[in-house]
Image (tube, rainbow, N blue to C red):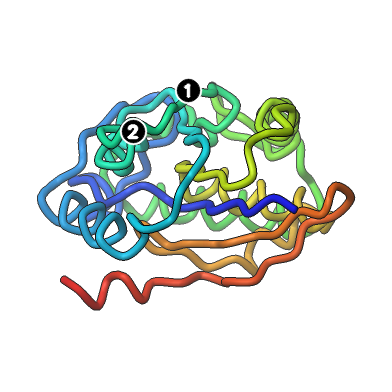
Amino acid sequence: MKEIYIIRHGETDLNKRGIVQGRGIDSDLNQTGINQANAFYNTYKHIKFDHIYVSNLKRTQQTVQKFIDNGIAYTKLSGLDELAWGIWEGQPVTEKSQQAFKEIAEKWLNGNYDAKFDLGESPNEVSIRLQDALFKILSNKNEERILVCMHGRALRLFLCLLEKKPLSSMIDYPHKNTTLYKLLYDGKSFKIVDFNSTTHLDLI
């Protein structure tokens, strides 16, 4: 039985301003994000993780850096990167951008998983690399407790894959910065045993 702890990275300044970062913007955590990361560490530092997996974007590694500093081995997987939002990455929130996001969200909800922004990625494209990342994560049979730090939209899509749900179910997985989803894997299927946990944030 594997225990897999999946969290979203801590807050960045763009998160705070409601601006999407996506795969193309490599932001640092802000002070709130650092505080969130510290709260998560202080709550879960007693768990003996065998390995940590992060995306190629530094905000994920920064979120779990204290675990890494304790000597836990870690691996960067590009498959865990955030969905690329293309032309909208880093752009200020406007009526036009809000309408664009509303329209693409409706397409995804209606099952058009190939829909994407110019220069961006579709849910289907992200799911392919997420499946590759999952294969790598599960390939080491000796790793029983695993910590994964990734990104909001990619996290939602990842949970759809793990629970074998249609990608439109991504809306069923709420998340805040450093939200935790804990899953058990018996070699055949995944079961969520801790859903959208943010109890560690009570320490802030």
Residue depicted at 65% across the width and 60% down the height: 183
Looking at the picture, tell me which residue is in the foreground, 100 or 190. Answer: 190
Q: Is residue 83 above or below residue 186?
A: above
> In screen coordinates, is 30 left or right of 119?
left
Residue with the mark numbered 2: 61
Residues at circles 2 and 1 in contact by the CB criterion of under 8 Å: yes
Q: What amino acid type is highlighted by mark number 2?
A: Gln
Choose the circle earlier in sequence order: 2 or 1.
2
Q: Provide the secondary structure element on which disc 1 rests.
A: strand
Residue with the mark numbered 1: 76
Residue 83 lies in quadrant:
top right
> In screen coordinates, is 40 left or right of 2?
left
Q: Where is residue 161 in the image (x, y as percent from the top left)?
A: 76, 48
Looking at the picture, tell me which residue is in the foreground, 25 or 34. Answer: 34
> In screen coordinates, is 110 left or right of 62?
right
Q: What amino acid type is highlighted by mark number 1?
A: Lys
Q: Provide the secondary structure element on which disc 2 rests.
A: helix
Q: Where is residue 117 in the image (x, y as percent from the top left)?
A: 57, 33
The numbered dot on residue 147 is none
Looking at the picture, tell me which residue is in the foreground, 183 or 86. Answer: 183
In the rendered image, the residue lying farthest to the left is: 31
Residue depicted at 66% across the width and 32% down the height: 137
The answer to whether one can see residue 168 in this image is yes
Cα distance in 3D space between marks 2 and 1: 8 Å
Number of callouts in the render? 2
Q: Give neighbour class at mark 2: few <14, some 14-19, many 20+ (Cα, 10 Å).
A: many
Q: Give neighbour class at mark 1: few <14, some 14-19, many 20+ (Cα, 10 Å).
A: some
Q: Where is residue 58 in the image (x, y as percent from the top left)?
A: 31, 28
Residue depicted at 41% across the width and 48% down the height: 97
Looking at the picture, tell me which residue is in the foreground, 31 or 74. Answer: 74
Residue 21 lies in quadrant:
top left
In the rendered image, the residue lying farthest to the right is: 188
